Image (cartoon, rainbow, N blue to C red):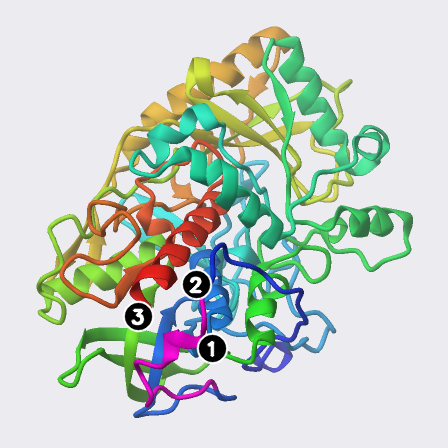
């Protein structure tokens, strides 16, 4: 299958200018006259860059754009591919129902989050390739992450939720809520292109019958049903339904990328960053070491890989500043390794701690024959059930786009699960371990049950037992929302500066201690906007 897959090293886009509060000038570069200007192509051995950003997800994309606007040359290192070249089928990404080698990161068999249907396993063999979704397995949990330029924005459902303000103090206790809700959440929502489904269309279209059934059942049990913003282009989706645009969300595309309608980062922050002329991206490159350089700044070792994961070159570069933005798992694993192996021995004892799963658990309900959820379902969720205050759970009313009528309601819950895990270095294996236990999901299950036990009782329905195994109700084996591992104001200062190492910063979801009460990427983006503004104003 390797002949029909995307290749390339960049994404194209034009931008409208972003903004950063306050005044920042070109002074950022004057202290480093030898810093290389951004150039096309992958980073070269021996290069010297002003700012190296490890990762191209939400935090890294914010950092790159704002640094570039402040006059700093930025080079972004991305382990995954650029995802800008169609395969032989004319599509960049494959659909959820027909995964091929574009689907998974260096696996020879798919590992779908919902991996059974009617009690039968649905995973299939694929050829090994640097696909877009990584199902990274740790003891007790599988962590799903995006691989490619755009990170998690490539593979998530795009639910762009700002937490309720009354919940914010529990999410980021050291951050000023007035600043976040007055400045940085609005800035993040604008930069991400967030919008909400048109209610009249929601009420009439066949594609959201599943969500209307979810609304009816929630409201009959007394739960608030809330529409949730998303970064999907809702006008485009209505055109898909009308047959005037190529189907994307309405063609089963979500888990392994979305070809048209979704405003992933490569269409928003990354497009703006590249349009400055100061940002270069090296896909299929992986940082393996960061250590202080003799002449100042940091020596960074990078492996270049091919599409089967083999190392084809090893490069050593120097960076004046390094921003860790490899995601909660990637950043945490790298920092834990660098501390344990002596590259960054002065990192503090908080590195690797405070990791959580955002309380993710999944379940399905079997509805009556008079409550069909529709054979045609949009893959983009647009609503949820809010029982956070009373039961510690927010449930996304999720699609189950099988192409046939299932009479099933499907949910991804975010819960107030208090359990936190720690990453640690295993010298025997030379790997980083995570000490999560599957049993730690039980508080999240109990919180989700505060919603679904009541709905089942009201409706006279039962849980589906055929979606996660043979007679298994709860999807308690995974998370889509890894958070923590380099917690703000603990492993770093209150703006992401790593303790003990001037010029090293963390600017991704690893800063957030395990839970955001909702889908996390808007909070990750807003926190990155807050932190990079401070760093530019004070450190540059």
* Residue 91, x across and y down, in percent: 71, 69
Q: Point out residue 373 in the picture as x, y percentages from the top left corner.
A: 73, 29
Q: Is residue 55 above or below residue 50?
A: above
Front: mark 3 or 1: 3
Question: Is residue 422 visible to us here?
Answer: no
> Of callouts 3 and 1, which one flags the residue occurring earlier in the amino acid sequence?
1
Q: Give the residue pinned by disc 3.
A: 322
Q: Residues within 10 Å of mark 2 (few under 14, many from 20)?
A: many
- Is residue 68 magenta-colored? no
Classify the position of the C terminus by image quarter.
Answer: bottom left
Which residue is nearer to you in this view: 284 or 150?
150
Earlier-in-chain disc, 1 versus 2: 2
Q: Please indicate whether residue 70 sits to the left or right of residue 142 in the image.
A: right
Which disc number belongs to residue 63?
A: 2
Residue holding disc 1? 283
Asked if the stretch drawn in magenta spans residue 28, the answer is yes
The residues bearing labels 3 and 2 have C-alpha atoms spaced at a distance of 11 Å
Q: Out of 70 and 15, give the one closest to the viewer.
A: 70
Instruction: Pinpoint residue 389: horizontal percent, then vertical percent.
Output: 45, 16
Q: CA distance from mark 1 to mark 2?
A: 17 Å
> Do residues under tags 1 and 2 come within 8 Å of each other at their CB atoms?
no
Q: Quadrant of the N terminus?
A: bottom right
> Image height check: is 48 above or below 65?
below
Q: Are marks 3 and 2 in contact (CB under 8 Å)?
A: no
């Amino acid at each position: 299958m390797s002949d029909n897959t995307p290749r390339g090293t960049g994404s194209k886009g034009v931008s409208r200018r972003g903004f950063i509060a306050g005044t920042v000038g070109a002074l950022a570069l004057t202290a480093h006259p030898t810093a290389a200007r951004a150039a096309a192509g992958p980073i070269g051995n021996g290069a010297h860059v002003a700012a190296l950003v490890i990762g191209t997800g939400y935090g890294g994309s914010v950092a790159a754009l704002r640094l570039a606007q402040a006059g700093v040359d930025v080079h972004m290192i991305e382990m995954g591919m650029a995802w800008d070249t169609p395969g032989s089928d004319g599509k960049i990404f494959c659909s959820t129902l027909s995964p091929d080698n574009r689907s998974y990161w260096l696996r020879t068999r798919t590992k779908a989050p919902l991996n059974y249907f009617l009690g039968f396993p649905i995973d299939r063999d694929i050829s090994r390739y640097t696909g877009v979704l990584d199902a990274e397995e740790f003891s007790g949990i599988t962590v799903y992450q995006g691989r490619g330029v755009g990170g998690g924005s490539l593979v998530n459902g795009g639910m762009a939720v700002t937490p309720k303000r009354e919940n914010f103090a529990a999410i980021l206790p050291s951050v000023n809520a007035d600043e976040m809700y007055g400045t940085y959440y609005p800035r993040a929502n604008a930069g991400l292109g967030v919008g909400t489904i048109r209610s009249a269309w929601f009420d009439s279209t066949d594609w959201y019958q599943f969500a209307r059934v979810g609304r009816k059942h929630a409201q009959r049990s007394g739960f608030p049903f809330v529409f949730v913003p998303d970064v999907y282009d809702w006008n485009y989706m209505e055109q898909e339904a009308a047959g005037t645009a190529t189907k994307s969300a309405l063609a089963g595309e979500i888990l392994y990328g979305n070809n048209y309608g979704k405003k992933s980062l490569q269409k928003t922050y990354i497009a703006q960053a590249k349009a400055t002329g100061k940002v270069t991206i090296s896909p299929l490159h992986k940082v393996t070491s960061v250590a202080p350089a003799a002449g100042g700044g940091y020596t960074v070792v990078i492996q270049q890989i091919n599409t089967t994961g083999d190392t084809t070159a090893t490069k050593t570069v120097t960076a004046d500043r390094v921003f860790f933005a490899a995601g909660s798992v990637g950043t945490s694993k790298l920092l834990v390794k660098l501390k344990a192996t002596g590259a960054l021995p002065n990192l503090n004892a908080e590195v690797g701690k405070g990791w959580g799963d955002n309380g993710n658990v999944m379940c399905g309900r079997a509805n009556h024959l008079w409550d069909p959820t529709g054979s045609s379902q949009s893959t983009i969720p647009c609503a949820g059930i809010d029982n956070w205050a009373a039961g510690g759970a927010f449930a996304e009313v999720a699609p189950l786009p099988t192409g046939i009528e299932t009479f099933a309601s499907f949910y991804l819950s975010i819960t107030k699960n208090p359990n936190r895990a720690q990453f640690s270095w295993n010298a025997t294996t030379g790997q980083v371990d995570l000490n999560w236990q599957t049993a730690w999901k039980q508080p999240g299950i109990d919180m989700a049950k505060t919603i679904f036990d009541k709905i089942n009782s009201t409706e006279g329905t039962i849980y589906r037992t055929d979606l996660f195994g043979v007679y298994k109700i709860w999807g308690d084996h995974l998370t889509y929302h890894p958070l923590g591992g380099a917690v703000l104001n603990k492993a770093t200062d209150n703006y992401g500066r790593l303790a003990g190492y001037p010029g090293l910063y963390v600017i991704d979801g690893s800063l957030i201690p395990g839970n955001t009460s909702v889908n996390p990427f808007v909070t990750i983006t807003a926190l990155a906007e807050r932190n990079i503004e401070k760093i530019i104003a004070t450190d540059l």
